[in-house]
Amino acid sequence: MSLEDYHTVISSKVRGTWNLHEASLQTAAPLDFFTLLSSISGLVGKKGQANYAAANTFLDAFSAYRNAHGLPANAVNLGVIEDVGYISEQGGMDQHFDRRHWTYINELVLRRILGYSIMQQSPDRPLNRASAPQLVTGIAVPQPPDSASARDARFAAMFVGDGRGAAGDAVDGKGGADKGLQEFFLLQRSGAEPSAVLRSTVEVVNGRFMKILALDEPLEPGKSLAAYGLDSLSAVEFRNWLRADVGAELTMLEITNASSLFGLCEKIIAKMSAK
């Protein structure tokens, strides 16, 4: 991401919010509320879109800033809006979001959320004084064991159990998904037969793509990845997982131009072997 790309995305929210804030002070406008439409990306991040996440983090911080100066403000961290706005207009984009991780929001619920945001800014009777600057929405509770949030202690309260159950397994690497990855590492490092390493890699990568692309059935290893709806956003998510969990570095072109799952896995094995 270039510096220009970063500033292009954050400038509208940063400058626009600051301009409204300054205008309200200069005109001494007695505002009853100052609601900022933020996103949960500012809390949990957004792979491949750090600029968008940063812009929303600013809104969250600015809401707290106004509150600290005795001014009304509330940042609404919105989740997936399913029937109005960008996602619904794109068609099919909702398939990128796992409903086990996110609670979808429709227009009726959105209107209620905005109403709660205004009520939260009441100087006499806010709904929750402890979290006056923010209203977080759209994150499913409890989170599933394979959620990436399981690795972050800040989200520990969003998982059930005492750490020795499913959520704990996801954290310490003993979950079912991680067992396949451990088997891959073992085969790759032990000098096993190339065919065995390839089978293990295909199994692990197939499981990851099923989650990213929200597929109910495994991919056919010889079939084109584009046939399953692999786009740039999905490729970025896969690349980030590959770098963080597998330790292999592939370019976007290497991922999107792979002839098949077999072809992609062979590239991954080659990268790992060259380390």
Image (spheres, helix red, strand yellow):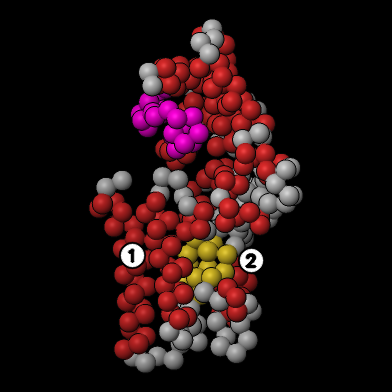
Amino acid marked by disc 2: Val
Q: Which mark's residue is nearer the viewer, 1 or 2?
A: 1
Tell me, yes or no, if residue 85 can be seen here: no
Q: What secondary structure is found at the residue carrying circle 2?
A: helix
Mark 2 Cα shell of 10 Å, populated few (<14), some (14-19), many (≥20): few
| 214 left or right of 269 in image | right
Dot placed on the residue nearer the N-terminal end, 1 or 2: 1
| Membership of 250 in magenta stretch | yes
* Overall secondary structure of the magenta section: helix
Placement of the C terminus among the 4 image quadrants: top left
Counting labels gives 2
Pick the front one: 78 or 147:
147
Tell me, yes or no, if residue 62 can be seen here: yes
Mark 1 Cα shell of 10 Å, populated few (<14), some (14-19), many (≥20): few
Placement of 250 over or under 143, stated as above or below:
above
Residue receiving disc 1: 12
Placement of 110 over or under 46, stated as above or below:
below
| 39 left or right of 255 in image | right
Placement of 12 over or under 5, stated as above or below:
below
Point 33% across, 91% down: residue: 27
Residue 6 place in picture, x, y as percent: 31, 54
Point 66% across, 50% down: residue: 143
Which label was assigned to residue 41? none
Q: What secondary structure is found at the residue carrying circle 1?
A: helix
Pick the front one: 212 or 171:
171
| Membership of 140 in magenta stretch | no
Amino acid marked by disc 1: Ser
Residue 97 place in picture, x, y as percent: 57, 46
Mark 1 → mark 2, Cα distance in angstroms: 26 Å
Which label was assigned to residue 109? 2
| Magenta residues (range) | 238-259
**Can you tell which quarter of the image residue 141 is in?**
bottom right
